[in-house]
Amino acid sequence: IVSSTDGVGTKIEIANKFNKYDTIGIDLVAMCVNDLIVQGAKPIFFLDYIAVNKLALNKVKKILDGIVHGCKLADCALVGGETAEMPGTYQKNKFDLAGFAVGLVDKKNLLTKNKIKKNNVILAVPSSGLHSNGFSLVRLILKKKRNLHLSSSIKNNLLKPTKIYVKEINKINQKKLINGCANITGGGLLNNIIRIIPKGLFININLSNIKIKPIFKWLKKNKIKDLEMLNTFNCGVGFCLIVDNKNIRNIKKMFSKSYQPYPIGFVSKEKIKIKTYGKLKW
């Protein structure tokens, strides 16, 4: 039995700012279930917790509709939850979300660091956009631009829901084609991959291979250094797979055209943890 709990952070404030609540529930499910599948688990059920200043039925219904849709995408059951009115704790129109997911995996199929070997290839699976991390920095940028008009494209991209990778990763796990994988969330691309690398191995990442999405190029224009971008955002890589080279062709068959994995590096034997080369293509 594998479990995960998470929230969507200050992306909630962006939803409030643009008065758009139908996607934030998908983010909530994604943040939990994408953490389960890195261990090889299949999500089986999900619960939510919504805390508000005062219950606004229309807003909460939109949030719950997103959660229901997210559970369908994750192929898991929404078995319950809690909605709490907390005046005095939350300011007017403010709210918070938390989610809890449980999954199952046969012990023999559990993905651990020990399966990762020298010369394994690191595949990047594209993100849908920002997902649900780095929004404190996004909000700071928006605050500086408060007098500027934001295009509808930028607004939509800021609230684009997190990609749920459950169905694709479960198919690949059934065929035992993955040695390790990482959900690229808080800490950005590099820090999340480092976590799963066993002692004595390190990762080589070619930054110039990363396919950067337009929303990150827009953020980069605000004089953010490359290292801060990598440590804060997914920069277009929502999930990483560490695999044997011979399995790449079969793995690609499991993904749609929009989310085709591509190589960004490899695993080698060294005492240090990471080596990057090339430059991000802004």
Image (spheres, rainbow, N blue to C red):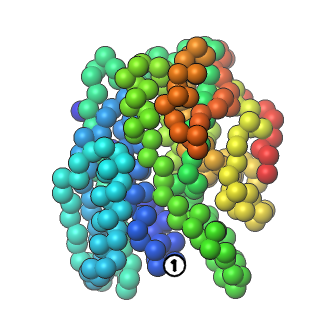
At x 51%, y 72%, the residue is 14
At x 77%, y 44%, the residue is 280
Residue 247: percent from left, percent from top: 54, 18
Residue 79: percent from left, percent from top: 18, 53
Which residue is identified by label 1?
A: 17
Residue 107: percent from left, percent from top: 28, 20
Q: Answer above or below: position of 267 versus 30.
A: above
Q: Which residue type does callout 1 highlight? A: Lys
Report whether 195 appears left or right of 206.
Answer: left
At x 32%, y 65%, the residue is 65
Report whether 107 appears left or right of 22.
Answer: left
* Residue placed most toward the observer, 185 or 248: 248
Quadrant in the rendering for residue 241: top right
Quadrant in the rendering for residue 84: bottom left
Quarter of the image containing the N terminus?
top left
Query: Which element is circle 1 on?
Result: helix
Residue 185: percent from left, percent from top: 51, 47
Report whether 185 appears left or right of 25.
Answer: right
At x 68%, y 52%, the residue is 213
- Residue 53 appears in the rendering: yes
Q: Answer above or below: position of 281 versus 111.
A: below
